[in-house]
Image (cartoon, rainbow, N blue to C red):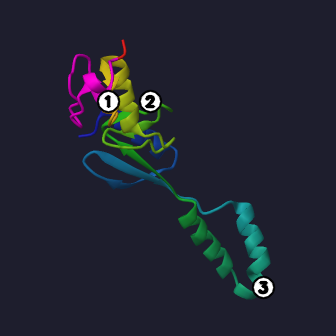
Amino acid sequence: MRSTRLQQQIDDLVAQGWTLEDEDRDRVVMVDREFGSVGSHILVALLTIWWTMGIGNVLWGAYNYVSNSQRRVLWEDTTGCPSCGADVAVDSAYCPACGDDLERSVESAAADENGFACPACEAVVTEGSRYCPACGTKLADAMEPSE
C-alpha cells in the first residue's frame, strides 16, 4: 500500500511522460527515456544516408535511448537532507543530491541539542556522562563539557 504522497509523486511523473520501471515494498523507480531531437535525427540522416541507408539514424536513436535515460528512485520513508533539503532515504549515509555525510550531520545536530562530542572519537555524549559510550574514554580527564 503506497502512501498518498508517494502515489502523488508517481502520478505527477507519469503525467510528465515518465514510466514505472521497477517497484519494491518501499521504493519505486521511474524512468524517462528520449530518442533525441528531430533536428539531430535530420542531421544524422543527411550525413549518413548515402552509405548507410538510415542505419546510422537508427543507431543514433538507440544511443540516445540508452544514454539520455533518466531515473528517479522514490522512497516511501524519506527525510530531508540538512544541507540541501533533498529527499533522502532514512538509512542513507550520504545525500545523493549534494553528497553531504548524513551520519556526521545527524551527530553534530544531536551534539548541539543534547550534549557534546567525545574528544577521542567524536561520538555524541550526553551532558553528565563520565565515560564515552562509543569508545570508553574517561571524559573528565579528556575534556570538560561545553555549556
Quarter of the figure with residue 43: bottom right
Quick one: label 2, few (<14), some, or many (20+) residues within 10 Å? some
What residue is drawn where x is 51% and y is 41%?
Answer: 98
User: Is residue 86 found left or right of 134 in the rendered image?
Assistant: right
How far apart marks 3 and 1 lie (CA) works out to 72 Å
User: Mark 2 or mark 1: which is in front?
Assistant: 1
Q: Would you place residue 43 above or below residue 101 in this image?
A: below
- Residue 125 x, y percent position in the rendering: 27, 25
Label at residue 118:
1
Residue 7 seen by the camera:
no
Q: Residue furthest front?
A: 141
Label at residue 82:
2
What residue is drawn where x is 52% and y is 44%?
Answer: 16
What residue is drawn where x is 42% and y is 36%?
Answer: 87
Ranked by sequence position, the earlier of labels 2 and 3 is: 3
How far apart marks 2 and 1 lie (CA) works out to 22 Å
Residue 59 seen by the camera:
yes
Quarter of the figure with residue 141: top left
Quadrant in which the C terminus is drawn = top left
User: Mark 3 or mark 1: which is in front?
Assistant: 1
Residue holding disc 3: 50
Q: Residue furthest top?
A: 147
Q: Depth check: 55 or 119 in front?
A: 119
Q: Secondary structure at mark 3?
A: helix
Range of the magenta residues? 124-145
